[in-house]
Image (spheres, rainbow, N blue to C red):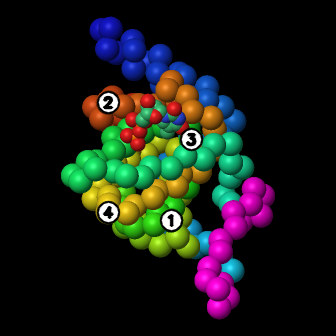
Amino acid sequence: MVQTLWLACEMEEIARLHQGEEMTANTALISLQIHGDDRGSLIALENGLNLPFDVKRVYYIYGTKPDVARGFHAHKKLKQLLIAVSGSVTVKCEYADRKKEYTLNRPDEGLLIEGFVWREMHDFSPDCVLVVLADEYYSESDYIRDYRRFLNLEKETNK
Ligand code: TYD
């Protein structure tokens, strides 16, 4: 009973967050333009020009210890672009009964994750620097960290 009420409250909150917008869940690889010359390469990311959303936050994950996996959460409403600017990482995504796995290993490729997607990051190479751009500031209340809760919420919102 308490569990059902909690689920209902969370569904209401997610619906409120997505008010007026379609509740999306999507992942896609995006090519980033390289400005290369005989000195090497340069990539520029600019709001409104070559990014799929306006960026409010940038963070990076590096020095990940061997056999460590990270993530294991979904966001109620967040857009992110993940770029392995060095090294490689496997990103596992799950939404709408679909499981997708991406290997990020190029600075000129970004993985867009938007909406209600469960994500896990595995197999970080020792030299991996994973840069993440996000359309919102950090907010713990936007996280769903429990996989069962994610599946339940997904099932209910897609009814
Ligand atoms: P955490 O959510 O555990 O990272 P991951 O999902 O990659 O496993 O975040 C680690 C810590 O960093 C945690 O204390 C929250 C903090 N943090 C911020 O302060 N700002 C941020 O933008 C992010 C992503 C995390």
**CB within 8 Å, label 3 to label 1:** no
Cα gap from disc 4 to disc 3, whole angstroms: 26 Å
Cα gap from disc 1 to disc 4, whole angstroms: 12 Å
Answer few, some or many: residues within 10 Å of disc 4's Cα (few below 14, many 20 plus, some between 14 and 19).
some
Residue 78 bears which disc, if any? 3
x 32%, y 8%: residue: 2
User: Residue 108's spot in the image, x, y percent?
Assistant: 55, 73
Q: Amino acid at mark 3?
A: Leu
Q: Earlier in the sequence, mark 1 or mark 4?
A: 1
Cα gap from disc 2 to disc 4, whole angstroms: 26 Å
Closer to the eye: label 1 or 2: 1
Answer few, some or many: residues within 10 Å of disc 1's Cα (few below 14, many 20 plus, some between 14 and 19).
some
- Range covered by the magenta-colored residues: 36-50
Closer to the eye: label 4 or 3: 4
User: Residue 92's spot in the image, x, y percent?
Assistant: 33, 55
Q: Earlier in the sequence, mark 1 or mark 2?
A: 1
> Which residue is the site of mark 2?
146
- Say what secondary structure mark 3 lies in: loop
Q: Overall secondary structure of the magenta stretch?
A: loop
Residue 85 bears which disc, if any? 1
Residue 56, quarter of picture: top right
Q: Amino acid at mark 2?
A: Asp
> Which residue is the site of mark 4?
125
User: Residue 29's spot in the image, x, y percent?
Assistant: 51, 67
121 above or below 90? above
